[in-house]
Image: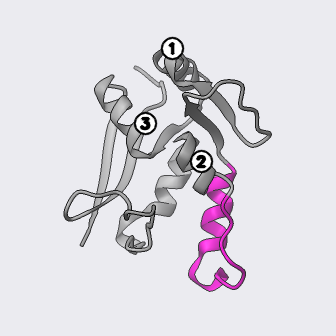
Amino acid sequence: MNNQSKVILDLAVSLDGYIEGPNGEVDWCIMDPEMNFNTFLKQISAIIYGRKSYDLWGTYTPPLGNAENGDDTMWQEIHSKQKYVFTHQKSLVSANAEYIHSEDMVVSLDKIKAQQTKDIWLYGGSSIITSFINNNLIDEYRLSIHP
């Protein structure tokens, strides 16, 4: 039996095939309860980001006063995960994430999968998602279509 962690692409996509607006907007995404996102977060122990996505969301905290819709709890759960950032830039360092040069993607991913006790969320952006697809590195796709 293979107990190795899976890489899961959990991605919101618009009906016309976009993952963000022209200026990086994701305000069109709706968190429906039937998406079971909190259950998904409990299934993972790590998140893989591209550098641009990490810069936008890797340390994001919701505005004060969003506790009533569960944002605070969701973001605490997200930030409790091990974070890996794949980048073409060299020598980036962070206390909150491990930076990995994109040239080492396949070898590094094997090591990451072996270290994790749960699955791994491939968060994105489009460049890293495309690289993972082209290298056949995604084990499971979870797509939610938003009009």
Q: For residue 40, say whether it is visible.
A: yes
Report if residue 67 lies within the magenta region: yes
Residue extending farthest left: 16
Residue type highlighted by circle 1: Val
Query: On the rendered structure, is 22 left or right of 74?
Result: left
Which mark is on residue 128? Answer: 3
Q: Nearer the viewer, mark 3 or mark 1?
A: 3
Q: Which residues are magenta?
A: 60-80
Q: Is residue 33 above or below residue 17?
A: below
**Label 1, label 2: how many angstroms apart (C-alpha)?**
21 Å
Q: Which residue is mark 1?
A: 107
Q: Position of residue 63 (x, y in %)?
A: 68, 77
Residue extending farthest top: 107
Residue type highlighted by circle 2: Tyr
In the picture, which quadrant includes the N terminus? top left
SS at circle 3: helix
Q: Position of residue 16 (x, y in %)?
A: 19, 62
Name which residue lies at 37% across and 53% down.
Answer: 11
Report if residue 123 lies within the magenta region: no
Q: Is residue 73 above or below residue 109?
A: below
Q: Quadrant of residue 76?
A: bottom right
Sequence order check: which comes first, mark 1 or mark 2? 2
Name which residue lies at 37% across and 73% down.
Answer: 28
Residue type highlighted by circle 3: Ile
SS at circle 1: helix
Would you call the spot at circle 1 few (<14 residues within 10 Å), some (14-19), or many (20 or more)? Answer: few
Which mark is on residue 7? Answer: none
Q: Which residue is mark 2?
A: 54
Residue nearer the viewer, 36 or 97 = 97
